[in-house]
Amino acid sequence: MSFHSILDLFQGVSTLFAVNPGMAVARIGLIFLGIFLVYLGKKGTLEPLLMIPMGLGMSTINAAVMFFDPLGLHGGLGTLFVESSAGATPDAIRNAADLMSILQIDFLQPIYSFMFSNGLIACLVFMGIGSLLDVGFVMIHPFISMFLALCAELGTILVLPIAQLFGFTAKQAAAIAMIGGADGPMVLFTSLKLAPELFVPIAVVAYLYLGLTYGGYPYLIKLMVPKSIRGIAMPQQNYDTNISSFQKLMFAVIINTILSLLFPVAAPLFFSLFLGIAIRESGIKAFQDLVSNTILYTATLFLGLMLGILCEASVIFDPKVLPLLLLGMLALLLSGIGGLIGGYILYFFKNGAFNPVIGIAGVSCVPSTAKVAQKSVSKVNPQAMIMQYALGANISGVITTAIIAAIYVTLLQ
């Protein structure tokens, strides 16, 4: 059997020789990166709920390329997983027959078309996250929590003009800047509304970087906060005896109504988040189990799989995506710096009686950044508990990120 016959038999290998060497190297690199993400997820260095399915999807999609292109969009190469162009550009699907064709061929296409590319999966994840959040942390420290959350939006604000300097339109720049909010569902929502042509790379970059914040932010804390300050203990309050479930429920209902009234364009996300909170505080165990387990973990699994499957080398290594990669990293870096600056402001305002590390939790990657803050403090002072304050800033960060996303969409759409 000749070498070419072997290549014809093993199409995944054959396609590596059918593209330019740079793209072949990129595919191989992403295969190994996907395997590495699974490893880091298993070790607990990165968030396993997302990184394991995402890494598996990333390695698979770059290995499983074949000579196949039913819509003629990719020069004869394709996969049997998903046609991401179907939801990313208005002209990708020429007619209903094309849509039916790819729905029948690509086995993950229904998930992409009916859950991912329309933002439904973001709402389901938000609903599940809401069912895990205790707004009592916000209610007992409202001003501290909201102040830190606002400071931690530095990346979502500063990267908007910076991205425009790179040649992106105002809408595209706003969608990219939202990566700095470190809120995956919000990034999906904003990019779908403002920059659908960049939806796939923005979604992939956002969630990849959100996982990396768990490993990168501890070094930022060490760089900006001296060890002598990092171990400051915070006074603890028993919020369970001060704030009842009824008060938390009414807080969720009232805040949801006010935000939906002010920013109806983001009402589905507000509703999903606060519905989860309402279910948690309502005491209806059947609903809570459904939302916090079945819905959240099912949505997270498919979200991770879709993100990995969308990590094709042709998407990730598109020259237009490189500035997006850099800007996403810059947005998250600036948001982390902004949160720590906010922590320092409170530290000086309270005459040294506040731990500035709490500020990093204003970046709304719930609950990862709150955990990062607590772990960083515990390494210096095992008796210091800051989680109560960190979770308050964390939950407030979700709300402030949603508000900024709504403002961007309302002004720019």
Image (cartoon, rainbow, N blue to C red):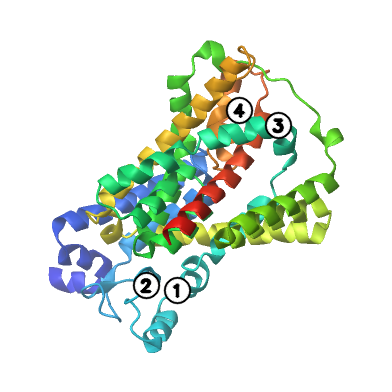
Q: Mark 1 is on which residue type?
A: Gln
Give the farthest residue toward the bottom.
Answer: 97
Whether residues under marks 2 and 4 lie with C-beta atoms below 8 angstroms apart, the answer is no
Q: Mark 2 is on which residue type?
A: Glu
- First reached walking from the N terminus: tag 3 or tag 4: 3
Q: Residue at x 25, y 47 (%)?
A: 166
Whether residues under marks 1 and 2 lie with C-beta atoms below 8 angstroms apart, the answer is yes
- First reached walking from the N terminus: tag 3 or tag 2: 2
The dot on residue 109 is 1
Q: Residue at x 40, y 47 (%)?
A: 177
Q: Position of residue 94 (x, y in %)?
A: 33, 83
Secondary structure of the residue carrying tag 1 is helix
> Where, quadrant-wise, is the C terminus in this rendering?
bottom left
Mark pair 2, 4: CA separation: 41 Å
The residue labelled by disc 4 is: 374
- First reached walking from the N terminus: tag 1 or tag 4: 1
Q: Residue at x 60, y 12 (%)?
A: 352
Mark pair 1, 2: CA separation: 7 Å
The residue labelled by disc 2 is: 83
Q: Residue at x 70, y 56 (%)?
A: 257
Secondary structure of the residue carrying tag 3 is loop
- First reached walking from the N terminus: tag 1 or tag 2: 2
Is residue 384 placed above or below 168 in the rendered structure? Answer: above
- Report if residue 39 is visible in the image: no
- First reached walking from the N terminus: tag 3 or tag 1: 1
Circle 3 or circle 2, nearest the eye: 3
Is residue 266 placed above or below 399 in the rendered structure? Answer: below
In this rendering, would 312 be left or right of 1? right
Circle 3 or circle 4, nearest the eye: 3
Mark pair 3, 1: CA separation: 44 Å
The residue labelled by disc 3 is: 141
